[in-house]
Amino acid sequence: MSPLFPDLTLPVPPDRPALRFGDRSLTYAELAAAAGALAPRLRAAGRVAVWATPTLETAVGVVAALLAGVTAVPLNPKSGDSELGHIVKDSAPTLILTAPGTELPAALGDLARVDVVDVVDVEGVEDVAATPGRTAPYAVEDVPDTTPAFVVYTSGTTGPPKGAVISRRAVATTLDALADAWQWTGDDVLVHALPLFHVHGLILGILGPLRRGGSVRHLGRFGTEGVARELNAGATMLFGVPTMYHRIAEALPSDPDLAKALARARLLVSGSAALPVHDHERIAAATGRRVIERYGMTETLMNTSVRADGEPRAGTVGVPLPGVELRLVEDDGTPLTAYDGESVGEIQVRGPNLFTEYLNRPDATAAAFTADGWFRTGDMAVRDPDGYVRIVGRKATDLIKSGGYKIGAGEIENALLEHPAVKEAAVTGAPDPDLGERVVAWIVPADPGARPTPEELAAHVAARLAPHKRPRTVHYLGSLPRNDMGKIMKRALKTDD
């Protein structure tokens, strides 16, 4: 039976490590006892908010909510009062789970509070841990797999955040599909430092190992020293976002211990944004290991991935996961009939991994789906004849229509990052009376005192891609605006040009 759905029945050795955050850890028996003791207090709660700090308490609280059959609403601790107030009003949780001593913002002041650590330390945890084969003292009754497991709020770039309702089935099928693609087993030990208020860090990074009966070691804060330490101490998998892998790539030339540690990993996985090809190649050259990428969204969980037994092709997000249907469509919704690696279309997906609805937003839910059930992702991609998908950007911010061509910002960004004088790069479109839109590059120079000229960058891109993809305008910045997941916030890149 699964270690997570529908209940935590310890199909693994009770003394196997389940969770470790810093110097605090729980075995499977201890997790079962702690979450099982908390679950009865949540059963009548409806929805419960979780103050999603990168701590043991967050993980225990979420597992307890799943055991109780209630819906968890992870809250980003960095959110402001206005955003938190909107989420609480929209999702209407009856209580909030947090660690004791945590000072919660005023926007959460009306919620009943449950301090999870009081439950983690309850008497009886040691007794359960010492009794092989014992299961959790509380197991959830039969809960339909259509029951919401989470309400996860989107970034809200075009308005207040929307709550994506994610069912237990969507979580379970996604994790099982990833297990198939990545050959993920209970013998794997995952290390990461991702935030726990989002799909990547929480559902993939915490529930993924638990569903397999494996272990997770959370670093708290990302650092290359911590990555090297855990991989050298037996961790087999690393999850990260491009910002983390970029820092790894930068550190590798002067850190042979880090290179050896990465070489020992069974799987290096990057997600949440595209990993520049330049960083792919630097890591591969130093370690002999290729980072694999996968593609997903809050609303869809995971859609595609490079498989562990497949070709780790840099710049692609692999092939559709088992059970996921994927197609590319033209602007008018007509599906592309042939995949040639060049034709750009919007990604639409269909399958059991999809969210159920936007909470309290039937209008937005209806607009997100086609009449026959395909979800409109808003992401633009090309697809190779062998099925590999390469994302070129978001339809709203990364698709540039210039001189009759559809141009994806991503490939131009990758080309710019191959220039030795470029540290970071982003590409957007700007209105142009002749071309319709022109390509605009936003550059962070490697050396501010020796920045490359616009003409040099244009020639660099034109030589690698095509002349019509060269940047017509270049802006120089000290840094690019990024969100908590490392994604570049292109809406913050504005110009009066």
Image (cartoon, rainbow, N blue to C red):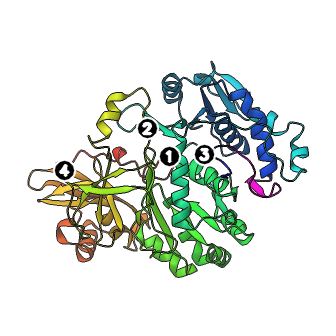
Q: Earlier in the sequence, mark 1 or mark 2?
A: 1
Q: Determine the CA span between mark 3 and mark 2.
A: 21 Å
Q: Which residue lies furthest to the top in this view?
A: 110
Query: Is 265 or 404 nearer to us in this picture?
Result: 265
- Do residues under tags 1 and 2 come within 8 Å of each other at their CB atoms? yes
Q: Which one is closest to the eye, mark 4 or mark 2?
A: 2
- Identify the mark at residue 231; answer none if there is no mark: none
Give residue 366's position: percent from left, percent from top. 31, 34
Residue designated by label 4: 331
Apparent side of residue 197 relative to residue 453 in the rendered image (left or right):
right
Give residue 470's position: percent from left, percent from top. 22, 66
- Whether residue 403 appears in magenta in the rendering, the answer is no
Residue 453's place in the image compared with 303, above or below, is below
The residue positioned 73% from the left and 38% from the top of the image is 139
Residue designated by label 1: 170
Q: Residues within 10 Å of mark 1 (few under 14, many from 20)?
A: many
Residue 321's place in the image compared with 288, above or below, is above
Q: Determine the CA span between mark 4 and mark 3.
A: 35 Å
The residue under label 1 is which amino acid type? Ala
Q: Which one is closest to the eye, mark 1 or mark 4?
A: 1
Residue designated by label 3: 196
- Whether residue 20 appears in magenta in the rendering, the answer is yes
